[in-house]
Image: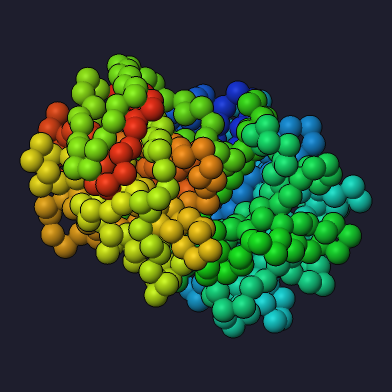
Amino acid sequence: MLVLGHGINHYTDPNGPMYYKGMYHLFYQYDPQGAVWGNIVWAHAVSKDLINWKIIDPAIYPSKPFDKYGCWSGSATILPGNKPIILYTGIVDENNTQVQNYAIPADYNDPYLTKWVKPDNNPLITPDIGVNKTAFRDPTTAWVGPDGYWRTIVGSRRRNRGMTYLYKSKDFMKWTKAKHPLHSVANTGNFECPDFFPVSLRGDKKGLDTSVLKGKIKHVFKVSLDVTRYEYYTIGTYVLDKDRYFPDNASIDGWNGLRLDYGNYYASKSFFDPSKNRRINTGWANESDAAIHDVEKGWAGIHAIPHIERKKVHLNNKKLKKGDQIEVKGITAAQADVEVTFSFASLDKAEPFDPSWDKYDAQKVCSQKGSSVEGGLGPFGLLTLASSKLEEYTPVFFRVFKAQHNKHVVLMCSDASRSSIKTLLYKPSFAGFVDVDLADKKFSLKTLIDNSVVESFGEGGKTCILSRVYPIIATYKNAHLYAFNNGTEIITIEKLDAWSMKSAKIH
Ligand code: DQQ
């Protein structure tokens, strides 16, 4: 994930990520004129490794009647013959009326794809009667069926029902709206930035191209809901001959659904990286005060994180009794990558799960049962960006509860409430429940710490939480990293590896 901050200028959604001729391209919503949102263009950054980025000229900016008032979010599709094409939302008037446009590279031989052309047959798709024309945006990467028709979906709402209208085209130019939306959900509000792609059931963690429709696959349907500013997804089946998507029964749709990230992460997009056969999801974490930090997040579990590593420390078989706290020394704790496996001998000491708690509101439970509130099995985990006297720290931790019928519920928290002594900051106790098989009595946690970002992946990415934090004591050399346990059950650090991360280059 590339975290875009907004300092002087306003950066938001990532747009049209793609891989082309050895280069990764990332576009993003950007206001070249200042810190407030507006005048939106597609800024453009290129990278060979997803770590070091070169920012080049904006690729798409308002200039024509079909996008005069803004170039909003969209996606890239690689057409046969390795020809990228962008679909994006154009704002055509002061009332925010939205249409879907396309842009193509001026020169396919330029690996930087510096210049983009917006042909005059735009817009390709306009809202017909019955479509809410001010909520009609963010076209997805298109996929092609065996019938030769390309398909894309556009996020919308009908009153309060989130909608994704499906459009089909043989030639990518003339698009027809399908009879039914691909998917819709009652009472969600507008669907922003939908994403729809296949995932393999083979367990090999390989990503699939968006047009893979056969084989042992399921589909993932993701949307961003702007009321909560979280992203929700389901896993289900795409029935091609009906052009409709049906979430699996076990996959809850709407507000109680799975979240891509339980922290600060919005308007994400994924793309298939053919050079490594992986699907990469990139999102926007707001409230940044830093420039640009980069880390990468894989879709299915964790892929190798391609950062520039320096020093490494290793711990193993360290016992943590209740109240223990051990420092992980020898790395730069303000910029580090930590991978740890915790284990325990028994589940007996897990506290009861209070039936009055909302099982979908992990954040509330985390705010009551913080890292310093003693427990049975947990809280245990890491104290990141901690000052030496713990005036500031951001704990990332687990706590296991015993629910009804001897089932266990694992809470994962990334708690910013003590992250900074600064006041008037948003310091949420982000949390999610982790769907984990406790049979082996182990947990894994990977945390990437980068000055004002703490991004954590529980159990190989089953639960991800990104927190933005603004410590003022625990910075640079004054930041420390600890492992801790405040539960009565002894926790063992089976293995802990931590690396210092070097800052990426952004020109
Ligand atoms: N931001 C874009 C829209 C999108 C929203 C406008 C999501 O296209 O729906 O900048 O953050």
What residue do we see at 54% from left, 75% from top?
Answer: 189
Residue 180 relative to residue 258: left or right? right
Q: Is residue 324 visible?
A: yes
Residue 304: x and y in percent read 51, 27
Of the pair 437 and 290, the residue shown nearer to us: 437
What residue do we see at 53% from left, 42% from top?
Answer: 439
Of all residues, the one furthest to the left in this rendering is: 389
Which quarter of the figure is the C terminus placed in?
top left
Residue 443 relative to residue 386: left or right? right
Q: Is residue 190 visible?
A: no
Of the pair 62 and 99, the residue shown nearer to us: 99
Residue 162, quarter of the rendered image: bottom right
Residue 27: x and y in percent read 51, 43
What residue do we see at 55% from left, 39% from top?
Answer: 301
Residue 272 relative to residue 402: left or right? right
Residue 211, quarter of the rendered image: top right
Residue 50: x and y in percent read 48, 30
Residue 138: x and y in percent read 59, 59
Residue 21 relative to residue 190: left or right? right
What residue do we see at 71% from left, 61% from top?
Answer: 248
Figure coloring: rainbow
Of all residues, the one furthest to the top in this rendering is: 311
Q: Is residue 405 above or below residue 108?
A: below
Q: Tally the marks.
A: 0
